[in-house]
Image (cartoon, rainbow, N blue to C red):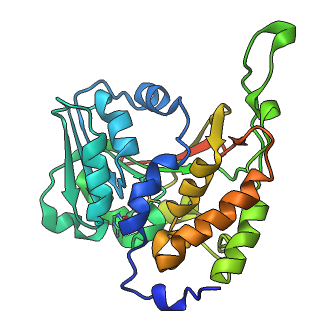
């Protein structure tokens, strides 16, 4: 077993090596762009800032509904992934190295929308909410985007085929056995996926305390058709801060072999069905005036 203590100091940069594996992360709801564009009147004219953009998934997804998009992230390895994921001849997207807390010094201008997709918790949240407020145009919105707790199953499992022949992907392959993977992580790192801090203030309450006031909550249907290979399941874990490659050091290939053998025993098809949960969007709007 490898201790994580030495690697968890302030200088640890989990996403430096995790960035490479990030493409194995489950995507957000397919309804994200159309639902938000319709709700918030994004017609391709405004500017978007995506804070903690990582490899640019949300920034690139939303880019068609804005005239200009800036993806901001303090990890150069993440921005390198974002640059290589940017389709050729994309002219309205720029990638900027920096922390959310540094926005006032970066002179990025004003935005119609600012997104933080699974990145708000990495920031000085109260200060960043106020910084974002000052970066928005009047009537603009700050959006916190997350997967909802996946222990709540999908409302409506999509099917392959039609009528009596319909087969849901979740019946073709076993679900990813997260509890089994957790046991492997405990064996290797001394702990599994960290439990959510029960004392953490809900983001709704935190935003309600700021100049934004009460946010609105939108829940969009998660993807029910995600089928993963054993390698993709492992890559998804390696993309997280709690199981990032730096924690395994030169034992990473051995960890991968160990987990591969265990996962192969859990699936007859060589695949797993992944349910990452619905997508929650908290929308805090800067009042016009
Ligand atoms: C879990 S990833 C989310 C990436 C992307 N938004 C997504 O949803 O796929 C969190 C990201 O926040 C970035 N991050 C960490 N601290 C930050 C800070 N102080 N300001 C802005 N981004 C930060 C990390 O480098 C990482 O890319």
Residue at the location (38% across, 35% down)?
61
255 left or right, relative to 9: right
Out of 83 and 230, give the one closest to the viewer: 230
13 left or right, relative to 232: left
Work out whether residue 158 can be spotted. yes
> Where residue 45 sits in the image (x, y, percent)?
22, 28
Out of 92 and 256, give the one closest to the viewer: 256
Residue at far left of view: 107
Residue at the location (46% across, 25% down)?
34
Quadrant location, the N terminus: bottom right
Work out whether residue 137 can be spotted. no
* Rendered position, 141 above or below 190: above
**How many numbered dots are placed on residues in this image?**
0
> Where residue 256 sits in the image (x, y, percent)?
59, 64
- Quarter residue 88 falls in: top left
25 left or right, relative to 271: left
Residue at far top of view: 163
Residue at the location (80% across, 53% down)?
265
> Where residue 144 sits in the image (x, y, percent)?
47, 52
Quadrant location, the C terminus: top left
- Quarter residue 57 falls in: top left
Residue at far right of view: 164
Out of 191 and 211, give the one closest to the viewer: 191
> Where residue 147 sits in the image (x, y, percent)?
59, 49
Image quarter for ligand 1 equals bottom left
């Amino acid at each position: 077993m490898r201790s994580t203590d030495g690697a968890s100091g302030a200088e640890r940069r989990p996403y430096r090596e995790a960035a490479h594996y990030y493409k194995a992360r489950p995507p957000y709801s397919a309804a994200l762009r159309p639902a938000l564009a319709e709700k918030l009147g994004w017609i391709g004219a405004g500017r978007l800032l995506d804070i903690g953009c990582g490899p640019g998934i949300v920034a690139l997804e939303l880019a068609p509904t804005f005239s200009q998009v800036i993806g901001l992230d303090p990890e150069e390895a993440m921005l390198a992934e974002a640059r290589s994921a940017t389709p050729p001849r994309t002219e309205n997207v720029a990638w900027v190295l920096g922390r959310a807390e540094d926005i006032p010094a970066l002179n990025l201008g004003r935005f119609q929308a600012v997104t933080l997709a699974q990145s708000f918790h990495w920031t000085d949240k109260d200060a960043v909410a106020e910084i974002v407020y000052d970066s928005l145009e009047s009537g603009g919105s700050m959006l916190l985007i997350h997967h909802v707790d996946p222990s709540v199953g999908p409302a409506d499992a999509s099917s392959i085929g039609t009528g009596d022949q319909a087969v849901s992907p979740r019946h073709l392959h076993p679900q990813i056995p997260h509890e089994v993977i957790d046991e492997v992580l405990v064996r290797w790192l001394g702990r599994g996926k960290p439990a959510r801090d029960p004392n953490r203030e809900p983001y709704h309450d935190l935003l309600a305390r700021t100049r934004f006031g009460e946010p609105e909550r939108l829940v969009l249907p998660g993807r029910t058709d995600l089928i993963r290979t054993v390698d993709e399941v492992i890559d998804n874990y390696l993309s997280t801060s709690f199981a990032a490659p730096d924690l395994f050091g030169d034992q990473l290939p051995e960890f991968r072999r160990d987990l591969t053998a265990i996962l192969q025993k859990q699936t007859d098809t060589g695949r797993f069905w992944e349910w990452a949960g619905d997508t929650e969007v908290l929308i805090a709007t800067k009042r016009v005036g």
